[in-house]
Image: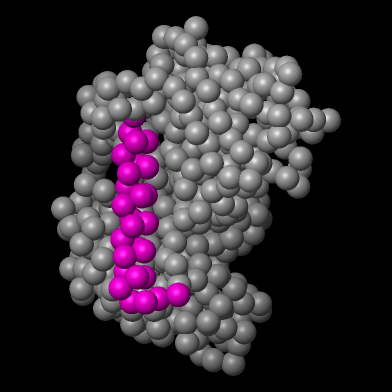
Amino acid sequence: MKKANIIIDKSYIVGDVDKRIYGSFIEHLGRAVYEGIYQPELACADEQGLRKDTIDLVSELNVPIVRYPGGNFVSGYRWEDTVGPKEQRPSRVDLAWNVIETNQFGLNEFVDWARKAKSDVMMAVNLGTRGVLEAVDVLEYCNLKGGTRLSDLRISHGYQQPHNIKTWCLGNEMDGPWQVGHKTATEYGRIANEAAHAMKILDPSIELVACGSSGSRMPTFGDWENEVLSECYEHVDYISMHQYFGNQENNTPDFLASSVEMDDFIKNVVAICDFVQGKKHGKKQINISFDEWNVWYHSNEQDKKLEKWVKHPHQLEDVYNFEDALLVGSMLITLLRHADRVKMACLAQLVNVIAPIMTSDTGAWRQTIFYPFMHASNFGRGTVLNTIVKCPVYDSKYGDAPYIDSVVVDNTEAEELVIFAVNKDLTEDFEITLDMRQYAAYQVAEHIVLHHEDIKAENTQSNPDNVKPHTGGASRVENGILTAVLENKSWNVIRLKKN
Ligand code: AHR
């Protein structure tokens, strides 16, 4: 068996986990909203038409914050169309996804849904085709107590209490030429700064996210972050990062090595944030909102054939397989390893659209990627320890890639130490050891394993439990040393509890 050694020290910490790194995303896109979270005609819908089966699965994921309403959709968003009596709401063209938006589900319904799902809302404003005033207007509608036209309008819509949305995104992917209202870095930096300034006058308690690059391979990457932050450093708190991976070449080792690129991307954006802070002699540290990340490629060809100007088609409906779950596990480990700077992150997306949860008229089920996210979100709370992994590497298109990705989280409150680990070796098991003498009274409580012999195995409505975790992993603590077997191609969660 191959061997690896994991080294930690109780006092050598990266940072506290901000629970918002287990955020997700609902965009008005495909069947995320309609048929995903809202489907009034179904028996499983509540009095507001919200699907209870979806809410149950979202609760299993324990998602503390959900980004809304886009995504690319937000660049054509007219929030006023989405509030008030439903029969008066207009249908509109959605230029981002070439479909018809009926606005039968809107801003207030989303706030209600998020409450039922026990999530906060991360709201985006349209800085593609709209400007400062509309950004302030939607904030006034949501957060002001009353006594103004728009806060009173909210009250007249049945929402006496303000929504108190604390996190706001200043547009979406404004560096992307596909974006309706695409801007240069200077143009965007200026409007982001003006909107941020005005929004914080109205509600100084909010936090704001400026758009970073929509991927590390964008030709403007680096310059974009520098110019945007140079314009709006004073008024924003986070810069966004987005990244999707795919296995188009059907090369699993390369695909699983993609987390190396994600790690580099984070390091580079952190460096630029600190550069801008330094050149401005600033006191404020800009942190990262990694508000779109996932695997996305399975549905690309199918989506090219979609008919235009229809309502909520099956769009971006990736059916995930087991190797996707392994990479999602490695991406979660990467986010945790940067807990000092990544304060928010959103798995894109949550339901039906590149999502861990799928629905049909007859039920809802968990895709393969559901499991690593659920485990990290439920057990990855506390303080991230600087986790050194000594293991062999393999050659990949990103250079050397370690066979084992791992991170250790110390949850002092629960007296629990949790080791997350992915074994990327497709054929060989690894035996890992970890010196536990600083955690003398800790014993293995459970070792959860997600493994399947078929790397392409999927969960579907007719076979929803094809890929699912079990708790029979082999690990033990003896003489202060943890020894655990990580099966070939597996995601592992080893939970150690104080006796
Ligand atoms: O999540 C799907 C899309 O990916 C989002 O709308 C956009 O922001 C990104 O390009």
Horizontal and vertical percent position of residue 473:
63, 16
The one of 126 and 195 positioned closer to us in this rendering: 195
Is residue 162 in the magenta section?
Answer: no
Residue at horizontal 39 percent and vertical 26 percent from the top: 402
Would you say the magenta stretch is mainly helix, strand or loop?
A: helix
Is 304 on the left-hand or right-hand side of 336?
left
Looking at the rendering, in which quadrant would you find the C terminus?
top right
Quadrant in the rendering for residue 44: top right
Quadrant in the rendering for residue 408: top right
Horizontal and vertical percent position of residue 337:
49, 43
Is residue 282 in the magenta section?
Answer: yes
Horizontal and vertical percent position of residue 137:
44, 82
Q: Is residue 291 above or below residue 228?
A: above
Q: Residue furthest top?
A: 1
Asked if residue 348 shows in the view, the reply is yes
Q: How is the image coloured?
A: one colour
Asked if residue 85 shows in the view, the reply is no
Residue at horizontal 56 percent and vertical 52 percent from the top: 15
Quadrant in the rendering for residue 317: top left
The region drawn magenta spans: 257-283
